[in-house]
Image (cartoon, grey):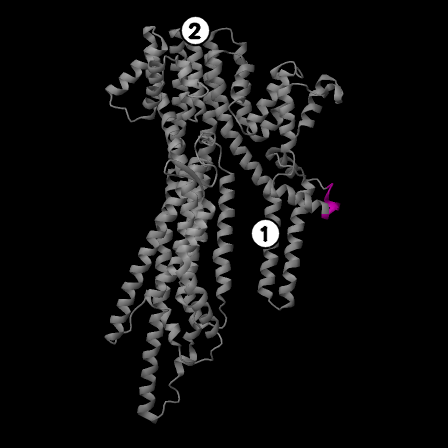
Amino acid sequence: MSSIEEIEQMVSKRLGEKTDSSSKIISGTYQTFVQEEKEARKFSTFFEKYCDFSVTMLRFFNNYKIKSIEEALEIASINATSGSVFAGSIMAFLLSSLGSIPFLILNNKGMAFFMMFVGIFLAYVCYSYPDYSAEITRIKAQEESLLAILYMTIYMRVNPVLENAVLFAASHLSGCLGKDLKTIIWLLDSEKVNSIEEATRMFVPLWMKRNKDFVKAFMTLQTVILQQTKEDQERILDKTLNSILDDTYEKMKHYSHDLKMPVLIINTFGLMLPLVGLLAFPMMSVFMSESINISYLFFGYIIVLPSLIWFMSQRILSKRPGAFSAPDVSLIKGLPKKNRYNLKIKDKEHSINLIWASIIIGLLIMTPGLIHLFFKTMPLYNETRNLPPGAEVPTTVKQEYELSNMLKTLTIPVGLAVGIFVLFYGRSIQKKRIRDQVVEIEDDLTVSLFQLSNQFTENIPVEIAVEKFIANYELLNLKKRQIYTFFSKILDKMKKFGKTFSQAVFDSNEGIILEYPSVILKEIMLIMTESAKKGAHVVYNIMSKISIYLDNVKKIKELIYDLLAETVSSVKMQAKIMSPFIAAIVGSLTLIIIEALYKMFEQLEQIMKNLLSAFTQATQGANFFTNLINFAKVTPPTLFQVLVGIYMIEAVVLLSRLATIVENGFDDVETDINVGKNVLMATIIYCTISIIGVVVLKGVIKTSFELGVTPTVP
């Protein structure tokens, strides 16, 4: 539902009540929900504030209705109207148009045209943002749907009461679907609806827009309570979970097929062709030095191209079906907050702000390159632009081709890469250990639950079953598995402190479950505790069936990874190896191409002088080649290398993010780690290939000209 007022109006309408103060829901829990909902309805995002500002300025769009946008805003729960979105699009174009006027006055038509183009692009982004946000909401709702059905089927195997199953799922889901389920429970609790079927019918239209598969599975689940026998109930529960798993697999299969072409376009037109196209720039700067403006190239490669890659990547990700959500480690005590790193010094823990740390470290590494760039390269470049044709190339220009200066400017992309590594890798590395432990435990649950359930065939208490389970893992030499560590800690608590199984797991201060932020693990342990009260036979039946459920989930998960493996591997290869390799080759070749051309034209000039002196005893035409080409105005290779390096790093960040989210979903920890590692590896490859390439090719050129042979440059 888009607002609490709409919920109350809908409920009141169904019950034939008036929406006045006397009919307000009085549940304390529901009042908390009301306050949370009102807070959520405030303009909280930049997009919402911008749309509100735009429609305030352009009031005549206030009542403008576009059905598709209204539907997208409802799905994404964005606090805006279609009229305000349309006004925001018009406002973006108008602001960019106003920004182009100063450039028209200065007769800079190129920049004016670019500002107009930016306005059109931003207007499109604003207009399409609700659709994009709705797609992202569908992805997250589908991920929640899988968990919701899994939780409800697991719970209903213990207690086939739909209301309790919905409460069980709602208490462990925090997204849009979890919010809807909480609303249903609050409506039941406040007696505003007579049954859960009546409450869920209110949400079915919205759920159909977000995820039809969940509606189908949930409707199937509702029929469980109508079954007369336990076998029929189990059959319905199995069918419910399997149906949503199969639907998810089919969606992911279509997505993996449709993914190949957009990824190919990004790799080809967003990365390969722009990098290869840079090879032509040295030649253009040699023969068309008057027409070349390096600032346009910097703007295009550092801002425009990465923006287009990011935009296309976001559209690819917005079409990804929801599969399996990542572990949420945000609530674990002791872990650093966002963009923080906990550093322990002499038994005292310090929280390091990684944003400032990355900026400081990056700037320190960049210092030699920035000093050379701003105090030597750029002033020299501006000075040589005004030299007349045929002017002698200053010695300072020739110095820009030296390896020492190239190494100085190489520190700029290196500093940027190290800063990115410190920020992304640092803010998630301390969370990754917990995340990996949870992932490993959830992967092992299928087998371990089956082995644990077999212990209950001997009709023994849960404490003895845990001890035998641990003994089996020790016999199989599986002590390093996290599931072994988890149950070992539980057994240790029971033996040393005399705690029950429930106390060892769920104690509010020292419970082992506090160390593992896995919802599915927590709920399985809870179900195991509750079912143990009904006897070992009940525990065996429930645990073995849950093991089968999790096995089906794991199989679908593996199939999805197989579907995406080829495309994800291709993107990873581009990010880690191909991008820095090609960028390094391009950067070193541009330096060598210009230097080789310069030396070749010097020799041709000398030949022309010799010919003229032999026939006319004069050298009036001796400056033929230097008049034709002015090497003093050629863009310095050190400046060009900064451009290539920065663009390479931006491309690696974007491609790494794309590959990780396609494979793992919106897993912030895994995304940060992969971005940090790939940027560092790509930078090492880039620097190594650049230095080797320049040294080797310079040696080839020097040897070739010393032998009097014009080298052939690739």
Query: Which amino acid, mark 2?
Result: Lys
- The image shows residue 359 at horizontal and vertical percentages of 45, 51
Residue 534 badge: 2
Report the residue marked by disc 1: 121
**Residue placed at 41% from the left, 55% from the top?**
364
**Given contact means CB atoms under 8 Å apart, are the residues at marks 2 and 1 in contact?**
no
Name the element at disc 1. Answer: helix
Residue 435, above or below 621: above
Q: Is residue 59 magenta?
A: yes
Residue 604, above or below 104: below
- The image shows residue 485 at horizontal and vertical percentages of 33, 23
Foreground: disc 2 or disc 1: 2
The reply, left or right, for residue 684 in relation to residue 246 is left
- Residue 256 visible in rendering: no
**Residue placed at 30% from the left, 91% from the top?**
614
**Residue placed at 34% from the left, 9% from the top?**
456
Question: What is the span of residues highlighted in magenta in the rendered image?
Answer: 57-63
Q: Are there few (<14), some (14-19), or many (20+) residues within 10 Å of tag 1?
A: some
Residue 689 badge: none
Query: Of all residues shown, which one is farthest toward the bottom?
Result: 617
Quadrant, the C terminus = bottom left
Instruction: Name which quarter of the figure residue 186 lies in.
Output: top right
- The image shows residue 417 at horizontal and vertical percentages of 40, 51
Query: Which amino acid, mark 1?
Result: Phe
Viewer-proximal residue among 366 and 653: 366
- Residue 426 visible in rendering: yes
